[in-house]
Image: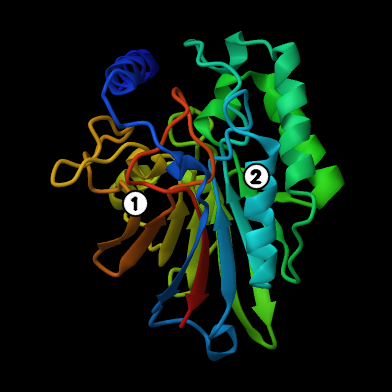
Amino acid sequence: MTRREFIVNGFRAGVVLLGAKGVYNTSRYQLRLKKITLLVPALPSSFKGLKIALLSDFHSSLIVSEGLISTAARICMQERPDLIALTGDFITGTNEVGGSAKVKMEKGDMKYINRCVDALSTLSAPMGIYGVLGNHDFWSGQGAVDAICDSFTKKIGVIWLRNMSVRLQRGDQEIYLLGVDDYWEKSCSLLDAYIALEAEVVKILLSHNPDINIEIEALRKRIDVVLSGHTHGGQVVFPYIGSPFLPSTAGQKYISGLVKDGSRQTYITNGVGNNMVPMRYNCPPEVVMITLS
């Protein structure tokens, strides 16, 4: 799916849904805490019980308030995670087609970046806060990308995993946390993130777009867990049908929740905010708390 198709189809879906009686509801404000346990067979014993908070798709903008994002941060901190993963789309910025290199940051982008970073300023975790960027962050231009990275690093201490990995250590045991740029960007490089890592070590990948699984399969790389957002859980989901519009080449497969591809497990969160239209239906926003076992 091209960027143009993404935007045009999203707009059409929004128009149809806005005209559908009863589709708009308040569920976009009803943040839920979702707790899951992931069984990772090769997990070192010292990492058993590791709690990872997954937050994504804040979309700080005219239709997503600072209050909603700060509520997500409060819910997260009540659970005292060991590590926090932020998987992109901090702002909506622009939907202009053309790629980050051709788009200039709008004046309003900085306002919404500041709102987002202020709302998440209460976040902290003993093993760190790690982030990757989403398609809307890139679409808002290089200036917005730089501002997001700089602001979140200075104010919250976010460690950006832009096609790289970091070692997480407990005692004499270790696992690796990897991250890539958005899958739709040319700068996305799983190979760079994976470089010099041993196949046997447990690896957790942060990728805004769950379609990164396509590249994982193509490159035949071992990844134990993928943490993603991007789909908003469909944002508008009809019983028995699913979401009429999903920005994924895999159809409804990576819409939300836990998906298994052999031994690899991908968890896709519904995210916090919303895009295109100010609504969610049958798909509440969420903060996800993942415990490894």
Q: Secondary structure at mark 2?
A: helix
Q: Nearer the viewer, residue 245 or 50?
A: 245
Left of 252 or right of it: where is 190?
Answer: right
Looking at the picture, how far across and down is residue 3, in whole percent? 39, 18
Q: Residue furthest front?
A: 22
Label 1 crowd bin: few (<14), some (14–19), many (20+), radius 10 Å: many
Q: Nearer the viewer, residue 126 or 199?
A: 126
Left of 234 or right of it: where is 209?
Answer: right
| Residue 172 seen anywhere in this rendered image of the structure | yes
Q: Which residue is mark 2?
A: 69
Q: Is 64 above or below relative to 168?
A: above
Q: Secondary structure at mark 1?
A: loop
- The Cα–Cα distance between marks 2 and 1, rounded to whole angstroms, is 20 Å
Q: Nearer the viewer, residue 21 or 92?
A: 21
Q: At x 72% / y 16%, what residue is drawn?
A: 108
Looking at the picture, how far across and down is residue 153, in whole percent? 80, 45
Q: At x 54% / y 38%, what residue is drawn?
A: 181
Q: Which residue is mark 1?
A: 256
Left of 163 or right of it: where is 156?
Answer: right
Q: Residue furthest right?
A: 154
| Residue 165 seen anywhere in this rendered image of the structure | no
Q: Quadrant of residue 214?
A: top left
Looking at the picture, how far across and down is residue 283, in whole percent? 36, 46
Q: Quadrant of residue 74?
A: bottom right
